Amino acid sequence: MSIQNLISAKAELTDGGLPAEPIVLSTRIRLARNLNAHLFPGRASNDEARATYSDCVSALEKLDALKQSYILNISQMENLSRQVLVERRLISRELTEAGEGAGVVISRNQHLSVMINEEDHLRLQVVRSGFNFRKTWAEINAVDSELENHLDYAFSHDFGYLTACPTNLGTGMRASAMLHLPGLVMGEHMEKVVRMVNQLGLAVRGCFGEGSEATGSIFQISNQQTLGEGEDAIINRLINILHAIIEQEHNAREVLLEQKTATVFDKIGRAYGVLTHAHMLSSEEAMAWLSLMRLAVDFGMLPDDSRSLIDRLMMETQPGHIQYAAHSEIEPEKRDVTRARVIREHLRALPDLNFDIRKSEKN
Amino acid sequence: MSIQNLISAKAELTDGGLPAEPIVLSTRIRLARNLNAHLFPGRASNDEARATYSDCVSALEKLDALKQSYILNISQMENLSRQVLVERRLISRELTEAGEGAGVVISRNQHLSVMINEEDHLRLQVVRSGFNFRKTWAEINAVDSELENHLDYAFSHDFGYLTACPTNLGTGMRASAMLHLPGLVMGEHMEKVVRMVNQLGLAVRGCFGEGSEATGSIFQISNQQTLGEGEDAIINRLINILHAIIEQEHNAREVLLEQKTATVFDKIGRAYGVLTHAHMLSSEEAMAWLSLMRLAVDFGMLPDDSRSLIDRLMMETQPGHIQYAAHSEIEPEKRDVTRARVIREHLRALPDLNFDIRKSEKN
């Protein structure tokens, strides 16, 4: 399976149909697992890392969920392909910097990916579009149980799953959701939300930038604790807090639309105007404007089914994807020209913004 | 005649058909004249200023060129109407601050306006669209000669026409052209041009801003000397220098289009995108983007006949016009909303930008 197949395939993340809660782009759970038979990747020799890789791949190939999967040896891939995988969130940036034996196995539908020899021997990940923790947990839990039949996991009855870094010890689980929070950002409530969320033991980070000023107003919110609580308890707490944040985002949007109508219409209008007419767009700028297009869909200014196009553009206009599509590493200025053309062509195929939303909003 | 008539009438400045040289928006000549019978406005009492006003109006009413003209007593006008006249360049801002006896007589077609009791007793002005010094001079010269039959001008055989300020002494003439120089501004050549023009005894000023960073890249270039040379010599020199600037502007545009294609297309595309989709626009921002729309017309990206619409919008979206149209003094934020709506509606009626101009450019 080539990366090209992976890019052109419909990926769950951006073709998930109409989500019930558009504020949540995706749900992700990852599990850190290690093998008794080998040293942690940070301490393993090249030979041992290669042995870990081959043990893991053999076991993974046996899983139903990984039939016809992409099996990729990271150290043998070219730079651009690796970057594409990072931008699709199928692997971490850390894995691209790992040495011998680093690899990833990705399911045909791209829901499931398993990194090998990142910080831990195995990092299982399931991503689902929308707000979908039950399904995501059920899926990764099944994969994990099946894999345990084929591999001898490092497990302590006192501590739970053993991991390279103690912050993952126990469940080895990191559950997260990617949230689109332009209302809280525009209303300048994001700092307060981050503080509140941190106090409740969760981590917030911008997905395409840093801190509370994340490009595109897209944030990942995840649990920080992995020890002393079961997976269900961790996930339930996360879900409750996410519900609270989602409600605050809805409120913030309502207040903006009510009290700052012209400002909001102006921002969204400009975003659309620039995206449909600019001839050079940096990835940061594109992300910021596309985020406002996503908000426009939520406000009913664009058809509901354009949301998946926008999500796809957010991913596919990142530098790696743009260069991969151009079949070469191209300089930033030319990338900006290509990015602007791609976005222009796609957005012009949509109907023009409909600002006559006040009545339907009120009902 | 009300100001409303004056606004709704087709004005020469923005309805001049297709200009031979679109870089020159308009040509203007003004003559400063004073009466022997009265003290200069700066030294006149209120009674004397009123006497000057009535002497001038009586004489002006006799002119063929001022049949059915607008005769406006500035001190009795409301603020917004005065601001509209300033924005239309029919009176100076100084006249709105002059006291008793300040007035203006404006011809039906708005080519000719005569200010009374500004710095001098009379300031005659003829404005023509495009690069049109011969016609403009012939017209103002005829008016001046005819007026001299009815008024006793202060004239010295040594110095020529006497004026309140010695910088106008002699011909009392200020000839100027308004030039659209986005190529020189974008190419960062404007400072050099200003220096060159100043050395040749001409003045350059931004029409909607200050210095070489004029909003909208529109500059007024005028003679500074009024003494020691005849009107024809002054005008000929001005025309020659303007030709040189126009050629430099054409060159700068060609270089930009050739070497910075993406940047130029991007600027023009964004300007169009924002103007057709923003919901709030300050007058400075509107001017900057409209200037790029004017350039787009020159490049063949918009139809030739949209230039007059753009010129009209540059004038009619200034604060006074926006408020006058709204029948009240409105706060800046609401003005910005109205301005954006007016521009949006007008520009959306045009065809979309055509960037496929390279071939026609080359031929």
Image (spheres, coloured by chain):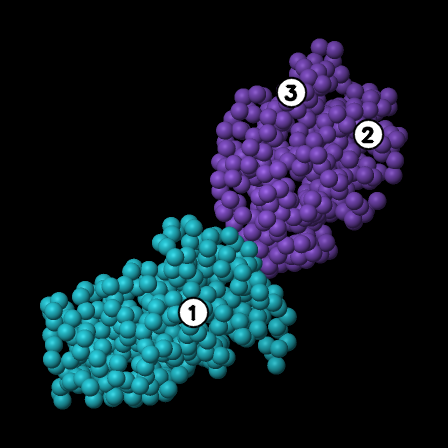
Chain colours: A purple, B cyan
Q: Relative to B154, does residue B49 appear above or below in the rendering?
A: above
Instruction: Count how many numbered circles sit on residues in the image.
Output: 3
Q: Who's the residue at 28% across and 84% down the image?
A: B63
**Looking at the image, is mark 3 or mark 1 nearer the viewer?**
1
Q: Secondary structure at mark 1?
A: helix
Residue A283: x and y in percent read 60, 49
Q: Quadrant of residue B152?
A: bottom left
Comparing B101 with B211, the one in front is B101
The CA distance from mark 3 to mark 1 is 66 Å
User: Which residue lies under the disc numbered 1?
Assistant: B8
The CA distance from mark 2 to mark 3 is 32 Å
The CA distance from mark 2 to mark 1 is 80 Å
Mark 2 is surrounded, within 10 Å at the Cα level, by few (under 14), some (14 to 19) or many (20 or more) other residues, namely many
Comparing A94 with B315, the one in front is B315
Q: Amino acid at mark 2?
A: Cys
Q: Chain of mark 3?
A: A
